[in-house]
Image: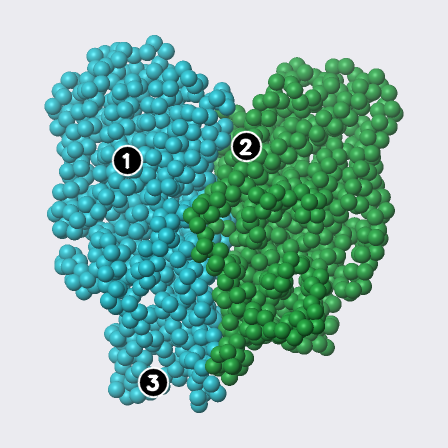
Chain colours: A green, B cyan
Amino acid sequence: MESDRHEEAQQLLMIEPLIDRDQMMRSESALLRRSAINSTSQVALVGAKVCPIESLDYEIIENDFFKQDWRSGEKVEIFKYIFMKWTLCFLVGVMGGLVGFFINLAVENVAGTKFVITSNLMLDRKFMYAFGSFAAINLGLTLFSAIITAFISPATAGSGIPEVKAYLNGVDAPGIFSVRTLVVKILGNISVVSASLYVGKAGPMVHTVSCIAALLSQGGSKKYRLTWRWLRFFKNDRDRRDLITCGSAAGLAAAFRAPVGGVLFALEEMASWWRSALLWRTFFTTAVVAVILRGLIDVCNSGKCGLFGKGGLIMFDVTSTNTSYHVADVPIVLLLGVIGGLLGSLYNSLLDKTLRVYNYINNKGRAHKIILACAICVVTTFLLFGLPWVSKCKPCPADASEACPTIGRSGNYKKYQCLPGHYNDLASLFFNTNDDAIRNLFSKNTDTVFQPTSLLIFFVTNYFLGILSYGIVAPTGLFVPIILTGASYGRFIGRLSGSRTSLNHGLFAVLGAASFLGGTMRMTVSLCVVLLEITNNLLLLPLVMLVLLVSKTVADMFNNNIYDIIMKLKGFPYLEAHAEPYMRQLTVSDVIKGPLQSFDGIEKVRNIVHVLKTTGHNGFPVIDGPPFSDYRAWFGLILREHILKGSGKADKIEDIEITEEEMEMFIDLHPFTNASPYTAGETMSLAKALMMFREAGLRHLLVVPKDSGRPPVVGILTRHDFMAEHVLGMYPHLENSRWKKLRLHLPKFV
Amino acid sequence: MESDRHEEAQQLLMIEPLIDRDQMMRSESALLRRSAINSTSQVALVGAKVCPIESLDYEIIENDFFKQDWRSGEKVEIFKYIFMKWTLCFLVGVMGGLVGFFINLAVENVAGTKFVITSNLMLDRKFMYAFGSFAAINLGLTLFSAIITAFISPATAGSGIPEVKAYLNGVDAPGIFSVRTLVVKILGNISVVSASLYVGKAGPMVHTVSCIAALLSQGGSKKYRLTWRWLRFFKNDRDRRDLITCGSAAGLAAAFRAPVGGVLFALEEMASWWRSALLWRTFFTTAVVAVILRGLIDVCNSGKCGLFGKGGLIMFDVTSTNTSYHVADVPIVLLLGVIGGLLGSLYNSLLDKTLRVYNYINNKGRAHKIILACAICVVTTFLLFGLPWVSKCKPCPADASEACPTIGRSGNYKKYQCLPGHYNDLASLFFNTNDDAIRNLFSKNTDTVFQPTSLLIFFVTNYFLGILSYGIVAPTGLFVPIILTGASYGRFIGRLSGSRTSLNHGLFAVLGAASFLGGTMRMTVSLCVVLLEITNNLLLLPLVMLVLLVSKTVADMFNNNIYDIIMKLKGFPYLEAHAEPYMRQLTVSDVIKGPLQSFDGIEKVRNIVHVLKTTGHNGFPVIDGPPFSDYRAWFGLILREHILKGSGKADKIEDIEITEEEMEMFIDLHPFTNASPYTAGETMSLAKALMMFREAGLRHLLVVPKDSGRPPVVGILTRHDFMAEHVLGMYPHLENSRWKKLRLHLPKFV
């Protein structure tokens, strides 16, 4: 049924977000030009399913009912509103902390049990049994994750960060904030991470906590009748957006125990609109997360959490009073930055291509999706189990700071197939949870533990498995595999540089991770703070800053950041923060599309019903004319949902039953109309209109004429009208101008 | 001549920013109502001088010349532009680091020499000589600072943060970014801080580095002919604003060696507009500052910087591997937060009152200003020298981690008047540079060093001297006295709580400083990060977060943050980020004023000259009509400066000589006109118009009619039209509505 609906959508919409839409539009538009209706970007790929995309109303709709609300708002009501806002933030923080802790606890115990079973069989030198159980458990976990994702909530696949980011930009993709999504995301992520795939927990955790925030803000789930009246306080998209911003910060804070990093992540990467008040609220939410996590970890430290050990929540305590570096170390740090930028942009480009191939496979149906996931699992299992045999066993160092070989727990010195008194350095990396592998790489005073070849093998495996694993039908994150890959080449370069630098190899691993994160995700301040928080070492600050700046700069020359690439693949109509240069050459009247549907202030019900049924528009200008006013004049903008609300409780026009008699009646639309819509003069440049649209968080922008001889409203702009494929589809010659070429590389710098 | 001009301005403008303008307007407006010309807020107090205030153009002016610019922009030009932007950030970072270091070096050496001289006399028990030299040096330094400030650049007085913040909001107060200001700010701050007054370096450093950024962005100073052509790249306010934002971040980063804190400070407190690209550039600038400072401190560590010791740049390294705290410590932390909130809001309110009194004194002329500064210096000197005698000498502890008593250098154990083997705890606080006193208070494992009565005396003295010292005619900062005051009561409460908590008293001091900062400055994330960076201890994070949230919440119930209070006193027309509730009840046409001056597209020179000479307006709508177009239609908005530029190099209309023949000619204004101005429909609510005005960074907003029977433009809104005194002056009944009462306490929470 899912795939039927999918096919139906395909046929109905005749659009395929993953093929080159630009090119399609270009050939079409040569024939159609200005009469074309903008059908681009109206659909997007959500969990390998094509869905219609709606915009969100982040603007304050000032119709009479809203004003009534404010005017009648007693002091106590307003205090209640403020109190609820803070209470919800508190709840998001508490639940974010709990969920984050639960996911970590579950992964540590499930994966821990698996490693204990396998290690015990290895100790008995029953290698085939060991491989058999390892493979069976991995496959079972992957299968579970893939099945629940594919059958229950396909929108859950992937990191979730692009979806949340798009939501915060005003793009409402269906199903990304439902109870189903929440449950599948948590369970699916636990099992897929426990299956030792190279996927992370951070992205899914951001999505999970954002989902909790979204559900809380609408007072639970209508579908499952899990609603609480007292929570249903926020009826508007704006308050919901704020809470989801807090949720995304709390998610990252929970994933890395990095409260300040979480706030900055929400600010730098996620949010499209930011206010000072939001900074404060986000900060409060992540502080709650930090307190909750600290309390729970205190509980675990007394040994009540099963196999949940130090590895539970990432906190690679590399504090060292003698972390020292000198100006002489700067060149090698710069080199790391350049390498990170090159490898990172290549990673993004390979991931882009892989996802296109995967999408082709995934579109063939659920069975294909699940088989793909299993195939990746089998490959990963073979590599994890097989590659450590390549490495030679090394005798345990005499001055090892922990037990060597490590038996029955995670540690730097895995015994694997080695004889007593020896350890396998590659097994310590491969045959561990990802968190433990990162800890091993970040650990200090272990410069000689890992051989260069082992690090190289680990890096290459990681790099490609990370790319191959992201696109499978399961909740998969990107942070951890990227940190792991970066740390491994960082340490490799540390080994190569030998005595030319006095930097500790653990520090090399941290800087490598920073450079690769900078090269793929292109954040700066937030990554810097996250890294400082997880390594708990502020003295690293200048080096981490430097490496991030270099790697981001280098990588930005080649392509976009990884989340933007994924968003583009999914077809989300994301509004960028700055206009493309060609937009300065166009005015808004160059892109508005005909014909404009408007209502009279006092309108016949039949007309309204007809327009609502025959168009998909969500906003209509309301125009007054004689005999009600002297001249034709616009009164404001009315939303579809407000017309429907005015008529009852229905969500769709089809659900409303109207008698023939009612059809002939007139309705006064003024009270439902937003009398303060944003307007643009028809000659305003498209670039400036985009800025206004984006900065004010609009869904509709009325285009008004400059002179008096014309209808009072000449068009409406929506976010789709600003999309490059639409504009360049209408004016293909702009694409061929030098702007097109420039815009590939410039905007990041400007 | 200065005071003449001042008086002239007073008479001319008949306005006094420091008296209660609200009240004045209320009585006036009862008579004048709608016909009143908005004369409020057009002037502000800059350095005890009333100055006319201009707005800045942060909007991109899209006239034909701008478009020409973009279209003809070759790729190489654009890369040059980007390269220049980054180069300037780099230069701001380098110069910020150098200036920050220089100020610290100078203070440490000047103040250090003073303390060495005095201490030596004390050692010889020549107490009167000691006092004499101490007082003479302090008075000399204060006099120097006051004289250069009063005579050369009165705009330099105070912190400078409010001025920079207002500039970034679009308020251009004259003289705040000149070479004179820069020089006086640096020299004046060094001498006033060295004079042992309770004033800080951080605020002036933010102003100093912002000033450097402003000068760099305009390519030097025109007045002193110190201009470099290659630097004069940015001709617009927008690029300048970005660079000054970077400058303010670099200033704080240099003051506290806190690069991430600097970025967050610029984001949270200073900037009114923020873009993602700016985050990256600010981050780069502060990273450069951090690297420069690190390099210079390395040089000093080898002993080449005179008396510049550990105290040079604040870095209170309270790292301790065993910083531990438990849930049981939370109540006392909350208590600290509440106390900080109460003390902080009281501080703000007392400072407000003190500044009003000082302004009355300062207005009487320069002599009065200088005498006031000297009086404060004398009082401070007496207290600093006299109060330590109140404290009993204590025998040196056997387990002291440093030499006791400390002789000839800063330290915890000042000998002062004590016998050998004893120390005076109060002298260790009073008779030190402020930075050293903070370090002493923050130091760990010194719980018994300071007696409770000493801490109490120090706290009370500090609290009131801090309030009294800020308003004198010298570059005075607020951060350091506030940290010092907070740390002293934090430690005092630590002493009182005795064995009820296991928290270290150094930690109490840090939390006390956090609570008092939160209570006065009302920042959260940035203060938190600054405190973490200066104490170099990430484990404090949850406690610092908690204390900041509580103190800010408590203090926000009583009044505004300290910089907003100062800005209000100075009369800057600052645009708030959110609208007052009563603004939702008004439309833009309710506040637009007076006769609208507009130009025809092809206009007679005489008319233009007449309008420019007789009005002070800076923007005029350009309207086309028959026979040039079928209907009267607005074409766009033209700026005064663009008309003047079109006519030559003059800055003022009076400077242009026009012959009688030329007066009769016509000029085509279209090429100079911004054809994409922002417009608002006349019924748009004032609240929404304010949001648009603020979010788009406008200077003028055209108000257009909704119907076709009216002139195409019915008014222009500027920032002054949104000011509370203007709006409430027109509609006094709104003031008496419950909104007025509510808005005192609400907006901070919403």
Which of these two is toward me, A429 or B339?
B339
**A293, above or below B356, in the image:** above
* Label 1 sits on residue: B107
Disc 1 vs disc 3: which is toward the camera?
3
Which of these two is toward me, A179 or B392?
A179
* Label 2 sits on residue: A290
Q: In the figure, residue A173 lies in which quadrant?
A: bottom right
> Is residue A168 something one can see in this rendering?
yes
Which of these two is toward me, A101 or A735?
A101
Amino acid, disc 1: Val
**Residue drawn at the location 25% of the way across and 60% of the way down:** B25
> Is residue A468 something one can see in this rendering?
no
**For numbered disc 2, what is the local secondary structure?**
helix
**Residue drawn at the location 27% of the way across and 33% of the way down:** B463
* Label 3 sits on residue: B604
**For numbered disc 3, what is the local secondary structure?**
strand
Q: Residues within 10 Å of mark 2 (few under 14, many from 20)?
A: many
* Disc 2 to disc 1, C-alpha distance: 40 Å
Amino acid, disc 2: Ala
